Image (cartoon, rainbow, N blue to C red):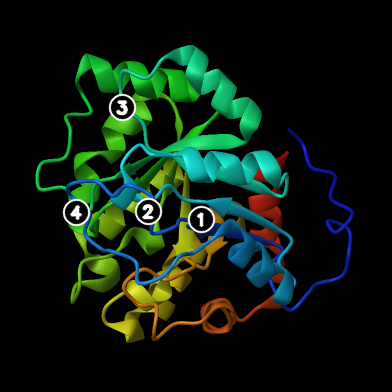
């Protein structure tokens, strides 16, 4: 579903055109038995659209929230109502292909593998997951991967071998204290070099220590170039609701990528990746 974008040829802008990582939900939605966080307030579609408009952000990509398991209903309703949005979903590996095709028509662009809070992540080498990833590739979707950096090497090559595009969340969440020299971050860089992986420069506020974020941004830019980077706010900042604001995430983006032309190129990468 291409979106006509008259802004592509426009001058550089202060704020990004695309927010590639946010969540929408209400407290009435059923949380999973393994939910790691209970939101203190609703984060509605209407609130998010208003936030985007208030900051001049034109398009956005929703990330399936693991606390709701495969209850994708609200995100699907959002992308059906707002063609400026796309979303990823969380699904069972035995989901029907025809259901996936309908989801694509609605605005789904990928399947999220949110393993960070899973004590025992699934076996991606199993037939069920290899079949799921093959279908993801055939639909021209991507696997949207999130886990602690030290566990990423457990998945990356298996996902690559299955064929889908790969998008890794939150700078790859490098191991605290090891920085750009951590094995997980090095695995992310190697995957970028192999040509089918993108990384979200998102949720800088989740990275510890905060002083390392600029180094991660620099290393990713050096190895990936803006053609493999995406930016996301992580609105409404789960577990950081009282300390983060949307404006602060925009400031972090400018701090970590101070060159206007680089930020604009990252924007164009997002437009092409999610909306072309």
Name the residue beneath numbered marker 2.
Answer: 189
Tag 3 and tag 2, C-beta contact below 8 Å: no
The residue positioned 16% from the left and 48% from the top of the image is 118
Q: CA distance from mark 3 to mark 4?
A: 17 Å
Q: Which residue is mark 4?
A: 117
SS class, disc 4: loop
The CA span between labels 3 and 2 is 29 Å
Q: Nearer the viewer, mark 1 or mark 3?
A: 3
Find residue 263 and report its horizontal and vertical position in percent: 65, 69
Task: Please identify the quadrant where the N terminus is shown.
Answer: top right
Dot 4, crowdedness within 10 Å: few (<14), some or many (≥20)?
some
Answer with mark 4 or mark 1, whichever residue precedes in sequence: 4
To which residue does mark 1 refer?
A: 224
Q: Is residue 252 left or right of residue 50?
A: left
**Image quadrant where residue 79 sits:** top right
Mark number displayed over residue 199: none
- Disc 2/disc 4 C-alpha distance (Å): 23 Å
Q: Nearer the viewer, residue 174 or 207?
A: 207
- At 46% from the left edge and 71% from the top edge, which residue is drawn? 217
Instruction: State the residue lying farthest toward the left.
Output: 119
Distance of label 1 from label 2 (alpha carbons): 8 Å
């Amino acid at each position: 579903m291409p979106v006509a974008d008259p802004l592509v040829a426009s001058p550089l802008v202060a704020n990004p055109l695309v927010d590639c990582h946010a969540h929408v939900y209400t407290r009435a939605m059923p949380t999973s038995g393994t939910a790691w966080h209970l939101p203190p307030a609703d984060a509605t579609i209407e609130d998010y659209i208003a936030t985007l408009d208030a900051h001049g952000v034109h398009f956005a990509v929703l990330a399936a929230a693991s606390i709701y398991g495969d209850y994708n209903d609200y995100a699907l309703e959002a992308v059906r109502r707002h063609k400026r949005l796309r979303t990823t979903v969380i699904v069972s590996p035995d989901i029907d292909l025809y259901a996936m095709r309908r989801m694509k028509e609605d605005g789904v662009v990928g399947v999220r593998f949110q393993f960070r809070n899973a004590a025992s992540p699934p076996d991606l080498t199993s037939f069920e997951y290899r079949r799921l990833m093959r279908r993801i590739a055939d639909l021209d979707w991507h696997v949207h991967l999130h886990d602690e950096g030290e566990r990423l090497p457990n998945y990356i090559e298996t996902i690559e071998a299955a064929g889908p595009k790969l998008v890794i969340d939150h700078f790859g969440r490098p191991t605290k204290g090891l920085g750009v020299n951590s094995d997980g971050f090095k695995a992310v860089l190697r995957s970028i070099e192999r040509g089918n992986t993108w990384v979200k420069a998102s949720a800088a506020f989740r990275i510890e220590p905060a002083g390392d974020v600029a180094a991660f941004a620099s290393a990713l830019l050096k190895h990936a170039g803006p053609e493999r980077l995406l930016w996301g706010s992580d609105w409404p900042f789960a577990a950081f609701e009282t300390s983060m604001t949307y404006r602060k995430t925009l400031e972090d983006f400018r701090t970590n990528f101070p060159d206007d032309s680089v930020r604009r190129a990252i924007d164009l990468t997002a437009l092409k990746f999610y909306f072309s």
